[in-house]
Amino acid sequence: MKTAKAVAACLAASLLAAGCGTGQAGSAGGDAFSFAIKSDPGLLDPAKVQNTTTYTALSLAYDTLVNIEPGGRIASGLADTWHVRPASVTFRLRHGVTCSDGSPVTARTVADNVTHLTDPATKSPAYGVVVPEGLTAKADDRAGTVTLSTPKPSAFILQSTRYLFIVCGAGLKDRSLLKRGTSGSGPFRLTAARPNQSYTFTRRRTGATAAGRAMPGSVVLKVVGSESTAANLLLSHQLNAAQFAGPDRARVTNVPGLTTSVEPNGTHEFFFHQGKGHPGHDPAVRKALLKAVDLKDLGAIATGGTGRRPTGLVMQPRPCTGDTVTGHLPAFRTRAAGAALDAAGWHRSGDGIRRKAGKRLTIRMIYGTSAGETMAAAAEYLAEAWKKAGVDVRLRALSDAAYGEVEAVTQDWDVDWAPLGVTLPTQLIGSLSGHFTPDGGNFAHLTNRTYESLTAAATKLPGTSGCATWARSEHALLDSADIVPVVDKTLVTAAHDATFRITAGLFDPTSIRMTGDKK
């Protein structure tokens, strides 16, 4: 199995790719807003996040120190002001914030959350991925401030607190209450849980962050595993809103009474295994194989024509803007690809397969079955392009359960289609450098000294002051064909008779408004 940190990195990637964008949704009747989620949230303790929809549910009931708006601007959350240093950030909390049980939310409350999350005994999947390693907290209740610090400079220590859900009141003292309940200062609290069916969050009537009258009386998260079923429910007004990554998006687009928006939702990308004995160990081979593929066509197939040209390795809204991809991937030239493979010592034999020192040029590619038919079609397209170049390509579709074993333990692969879906460039470091799997999170066995040097420098620069260096670090990966971004996925948010905002899978719960006639 992967190390705990590597597993956490993959889990965080899934969580943060849960969905982003803004949408407008409808009232299925009365004062309740209903939203489709694709799986059961599971355990609701913020320190024990388990699946891709848990963050969406938690964002209704818990406040974080800061919020990030759709355009990437950092906005106030529990904190009204903050001061950032290279290795720390000090927050001044808003006055009068109360927990759902009426108890006050203080600087000590925030510090206790950090202490619990970073305790090795907690085994939190967020530690070292969503929040920096070595994070500590110092509270000053009299001043109403809390300072979060790391042992060495941490570039995005402020932005990382967007996913630090603050537990308060009874739940902070007894975490067992969070198995099927919430204990936060957010505008909603969980009042009914029907596992694998629905979760009802009721609006708080008191408290500094309690909802105003314009908000719905409740939010119902309905577990709907099939996008086709979600589309049926939305079209029949049994749902207020849902998000669509697959072909059912067409059914809810340009429909009278429904409003849709389209936003980026992570990147499809693949990696070459660079360990010794793998074809991808030679950068000349990696670059030659990329020249043999029309990445534009590959991306269109992988997304069913709904994707966009990739512009970076970090999901939107990313802290560093700009295009780091264009001009850093080889152009599609089949003859040049063949010539490059010849130059690398791989020559065609009588059966058309290239060989070097008697060894066949074989590529074993793995990809996930959960990505659906378009992913399978993309894998076939990629295989065909490489076969034309003289490569023996062997495809292997894997379930989510089997993926980690093959990727990190048996390592029986040469190309891995593995979307990462991170929101900060710092979250890439553990997967793209450092110890190789199974001892670390570096599953493709990358050794890019330029990337390592640049990220070491960038992590010492707070916030966006290091963006130019982060951009150069991405260039280093792309120029060496260490990571191949193919296409940006998109997500359609469809809605009926209400408005709301959801960014990177997190609700802005105070933005939810019912606009339809009351039943």
Image (cartoon, rainbow, N blue to C red):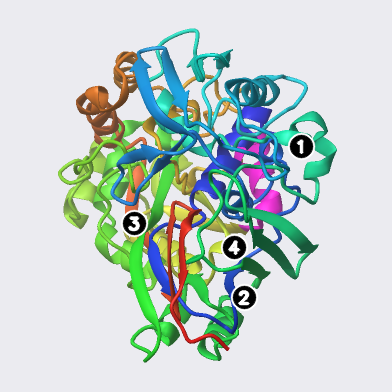
Q: Which residue is mark 3?
A: 488
Residue 403's spot in the image, x, y percent? 64, 48
Tell me the chief SS of the magenta region. helix
Mark 1 → mark 3, Cα distance in angstroms: 39 Å
Query: Could you tell me which residue is drawn at 78 percent across and 21 percent down?
Result: 121
What label does residue 124 carry, if any?
none
Query: Mark 2 packing: few (<14 Cα in 10 Å), some, or many (20+)?
Result: some
Mark 2 → mark 4, Cα distance in angstroms: 12 Å
Label 1: element kind: helix
Query: Could you tell me which residue is drawn at 72 percent across and 47 percent down?
Result: 182
Q: Is residue 44 above or below residue 260?
A: above
Q: Amino acid at mark 3?
A: Asp
Query: Could you say which is closer to the camera, residue 353 or residue 385?
Result: 385
Query: Could you say which is closer to the camera, residue 178 or residue 476?
Result: 178
Q: Which residue is mark 2?
A: 226
Which-is-in-front pick, marks 2 and 4? Answer: 2
> Is tag 2's residue or tag 4's residue first in the polypeptide sequence?
2
Query: In which quadrant of the rendered view does residue 490 lie?
Result: bottom left
Relative side of 34 to 148, left or right? right
Query: Could you say which is closer to the camera, residue 328 or residue 493?
Result: 493
Query: Of all residues shown, which one is farthest toward the top?
Result: 151
Q: Which residue is mark 4?
A: 370
Q: Which residues are magenta?
A: 398-411
Q: Which residue is mark 1?
A: 171
Residue 294 is at least partly visible in this image? no
> Is tag 1's residue or tag 3's residue first in the polypeptide sequence?
1
